[in-house]
Amino acid sequence: MNSKIKKPIISAPEEPERTKRTYLFPDGSKYAGEVKIEDGKSMRDGIGEFTTPFERYVGWWKNDMMEGQGKLFFSSGAKYEGFFMNNMMHGVGTYRWPIREIQTPHKSVEAPVIGAAVYEGNWANNKMNGNGCFTDENGVKFHGLFHNGTFTNSLSKAVLNR
């Protein structure tokens, strides 16, 4: 018996269209960068810059979310540079708080400037998490393990409220 079996034709899924676009939103925010268009829906995907009146993000996007390496600048002067996942600081990164001045009661006394605090290390869901080093504005270092934004070690525990 000689019968031929027909194999079904399997085609690869269609790749979404990729292009560069600039979008202006009613709230004043703007996106300029790579997008993918899938089923008629446009999503930020690839390298792009998103600017709002309060912050600016420059980096990688995936499925309309900050994903991968990027930089996030806040209106306060704070800055994060590192990895993102699902629009959150996640992975290795550095967060720098803004430099600030001490308020003095007399206008004739010049306000001393305090250095910026810095955290370098691992992040999970927008919180310092894992190995890292927090340096406060006076240069005091907390090097070790962080959990959900809290510094911990075998001898003590310090909560860093910033």
Image (cartoon, grey):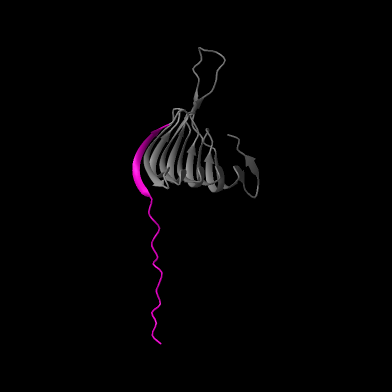
Highlighted magenta segment, given as a residue range: 1-24
Q: Main secondary structure of the magenta part?
A: loop
| Residue 49 percent location from the top left of the image | 39, 37
Q: In which quarter of the image is the N terminus?
A: bottom left
> Does the segment drawn in magenta span residue 56?
no
Magenta run includes residue 18 = yes
Residue situated in front as seen by the camera: 82 or 52 = 52
Along the viewing direction, whichever of 91 and 48 lies nearer the viewer: 48
Q: Decide which of 55, 130 is in the foreground and name it.
A: 55
Tell me what residue is drawn at x 48 percent, y 29 percent.
54
Query: Which image quadrant is residue 157 in?
Result: top right
**Could you say which is closer to the camera, residue 27 or residue 146?**
27
Q: Is residue 72 left or right of residue 144?
A: left
Which percent across, then down, holds residue 57?
Answer: 43, 37
Picture coordinates of residue 86, whole percent (x, y): 51, 46
Which residue is most to the bottom?
1
Name the residue at 53% across, 41% down.
134
Q: Where is residue 28, by image quadrant? A: top left
Total numbered labels placed on residues in the image:
0
Q: Is residue 113 left or right of residue 3?
A: right
Q: In which quarter of the image is the C terminus?
A: top right
Picture coordinates of residue 15 (x, y %)? 37, 54
